[in-house]
Image (cartoon, rainbow, N blue to C red):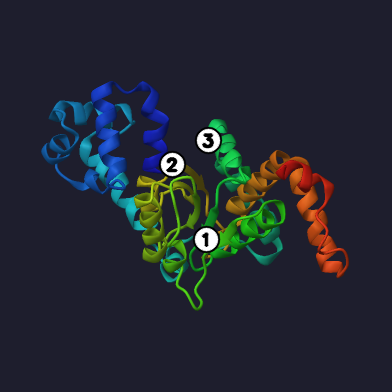
Amino acid sequence: MTVVETIQKTLPTLSTSERRVAQALFATNLVAGLDTIARLAERAQVSGPTVLRFASKAGYSSYPDFQDALRKDLEERVSSPLQLFESRAPKPARTGLVQSARDTFQQGLDRTFDRVIQSDFEAAVDLLADRSRTVYLAGGRFSHHLAEILWGHLFQLRANAHILRAGVLSPRDQLLDVKKRDVLVAYDLRRYQSDTVELAAIAKRARATIILFTDQWLSPIARQAHYVFSCDVEAPSPYDSLVPCLALTEAVIAGVTERCGDSGRGRVTNLERLRAGSGAHEVSKEVEDDDG
C-alpha cells in the first residue's frame, strides 16, 4: 500500500487538525512530508504533536518512519523503465509466465476497482454523458492511447468530444475556448508529463471540471482535479501496465453508453449510415426527438 493509499484509508479516523496535515500533504503532492515536523506543522497550521499523532494514526512508528516510506514512494513515482529493469525481481521461467502475468493483472484490477468511490464514478459518468458540456481528452506518451479509446467511444455517443493531440495546433492552443461547464479528462501516469500537467492548469484557470486517471502515487494534477481515479500499474514486465486503467476506462464507457440511451443509439445509427455511404444526411428519429 502506498503512502497516499494509507492516508486515504486513515482519513475517517483523523481529527479536524490532523486532517489539515493530510490536506497539506495532498496540496504539495506529498513533498511537504519531507520537511521537518516544525515546517510541516507550520504549513498545516497545526502543532508539532498533531503531526506526530497524524503519523501514528497512519500506522507509522515515528515521523522518520513515515518519511522513509514517503521517500520510497517518491522514488517509485519517477522510476524509468531502465530503473525498473534493475529493481524488479527476476521473472519466473517461461512456462510459468502466463500464470504470473494473470495473477499480476488480476491483483491490479482488484486493487484499482476497490479504490473507486462509487459516487465519484457516477458523477464522472454523468459529466461525460451530458451533451451540453464540451469534453476534452488528453494523455501522455503511452496513456494517450487510453484517452484515444475513451474519445473514440464518446465521439460515437455524443457531440463535442475532442482529443487533444499535437498537429497544426498544439494541445494547449486547442483549449483556447475551454470554459466553466467544460470537462477535461486527463490520463497522467508516472513519469508524469509537464505538458499534460500544463493542460490541467489551463482547464483549472477556466474553472472547467477535471477528471484524472493516474497511478497509485498520483500525478501532480490530483491537486487540481475534481475526480481522481488511481490505477495500479504493476506488470510482469519492467514497463508499467495499462490494463487496470483500461478496464476502468471501459467501465466508464459502459456507464456513458447507458446514460446516453436512445440519443446515443441514434448517433451511432447515423454514424453507421455515414460509413455505409447512404442516408448520411438523414437524422435518426431518436436524435431528432431528443434534440427537440
Label 3 crowd (10 A; few <14 / some 14-19 / many >=20): some
Quarter of the view holding residue 197? bottom left
* Residue beneath disc 1: 240
Residue 220 horizontal/vertical position (percent): 36, 52
In the rendered structure, the answer to whether residue 107 lies left or right of residue 87 reads right
Q: Residue at x 48, y 65 (%)?
A: 140
Q: Is residue 275 visible?
A: yes
Q: Residue at x 59, y 35 (%)?
A: 122
Query: How crowded is the residue under tag 2: few (<14 C-alpha within 10 Å), some, or many (20+)?
Result: some
- Residue 160 versus residue 281: which sits nearer the camera? 281
Disc 2 + disc 1, Cβ < 8 Å: no
Look at the numbered disc 3 and give the secondary structure of its residue.
Answer: helix
Q: Earlier in the sequence, mark 3 or mark 1?
A: 3
Residue named by callout 2? 226
The location of residue 173, given as percent across then percent down, is 43, 68
Q: Earlier in the sequence, mark 3 or mark 2?
A: 3
Q: Which mark is residue 120?
A: 3
Q: Amino acid at mark 1?
A: Asp
Which circle's residue, 2 or 1, is located before the other in the chain? 2
Residue at the spot 44% in from the left edge and 51% down from the top edge: 179
Residue 276 x %, y %? 87, 68
Q: Residue furthest front?
A: 292
Tag 1: Cα neighbours inside 10 Å, few (<14), some, or many (≥20)?
A: some
Tell me the mark number nearer the camera, choosing from 3 and 1.
3
